[in-house]
Structure formats: C-alpha cells, structure tokens
Image: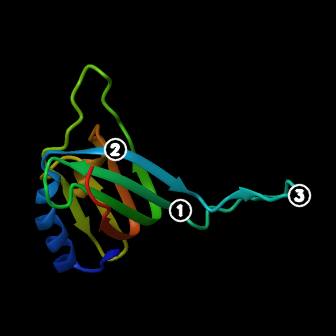
Amino acid sequence: MWNEVNNNNDLAVFINKICSFHDSCIKEMKYLSGAYVDDELLMHAINDRRILRVIIQRQSEDFSTIEMEFEGLKFLKLFPLDENYTCEISDSTMILESDCIYWCDSGNLSVTDFENYRGTIICASKFRWRSVGKC
C-alpha cells in the first residue's frame, strides 16, 4: 500500500517511522522517463512520466526495506562514494514546499545548501512511499 505525502504532517509521520533514515543505505534506483521507441521504431521522445523509484534498506526490524517514489522528477544529484568509503545514511533532510519535495542523504540541510552539497539530492513534484518487506 502506497502512503502519500501531501503535507508537513504526512512528512513528519514518515520521517518518524523511519528514524530520519538512520542506519540506511540506497540499494537501487530506477528512472522511468516516459520516452520509448515503438514496434515500428518510431520514437516518442517526451519525458512525460519522470518517475524515480528508490529502494532504501535499513538496519531495523520495522520498515527494513522502503520504496520511495518521486513523481514529476525535477532533478537528481547523485554523487556516490567510491569503494574505499562507507555509504550508509545516518540522517536525512526532507523539505516539502508548495511545488516540490526534496530529499537529501544528509541531515540539517536547507535548499540553499544543496547547490554545493556533494551527496544525493532528489527534487520532485510528488512523493509517496511504501514498506516492501524485509531485506
């Protein structure tokens, strides 16, 4: 079952349930643009879906695997650390504004901090999430 986040109360409930992503990691991401080539090799070259799905796994019995769906993706900044560094998430930032929602893999940041931040940042029009079971 998908849980919609439409306001700051919904967002606070989500953040509380998953402890601000403490002891989490990004397992995988999938992007659906909406563009495609049909059977006759004609291209529909319009990004009319722009859906990013992110699977997060947590070191927790509750909500151990979470799927987040960002619809109407505006941007994704992805700076994965190399194999010599750890990639666990200790804290996160989620900000809901009138026309977008932001998610960042570090805590206590503001939208103005995002420009120079070297980590993962997602901005989209809509957000929803669901628990997808155990690891």
Q: Amino acid at mark 1?
A: Arg
Q: Secondary structure at mark 3?
A: loop
In the image shown, does 74 or 10 lie closer to the viewer?
Answer: 10
Disc assigned to residue 27 = 2
Q: Residue furthest right?
A: 40
Residue topped by disc 3: 40
Q: Amino acid at mark 2?
A: Lys
Report the mark closest to the observer, 1 or 2.
Answer: 2
Residue topped by disc 1: 50
Q: Are marks 1 and 3 in contact (CB under 8 Å)?
A: no
Q: Secondary structure at mark 1?
A: loop
Residue at 32 percent across and 77 percent down: it is 4
Q: Is residue 4 left or right of residue 16?
A: right
On the image, which quarter does residue 78 sit in? top left
Where residue 68 appears, as percent x and y from the top left, is: 34, 61
Q: Is residue 32 left or right of residue 61?
A: right
Q: Secondary structure at mark 2?
A: strand
In the image shown, does 37 or 78 lie closer to the viewer?
Answer: 37
Residue at 20 percent across and 72 percent down: it is 11
Where residue 107 appears, as percent x and y from the top left, is: 14, 50
3 or 2: tag closer to the N-terminus: 2
Where residue 83 appears, as percent x and y from the top left, is: 31, 22
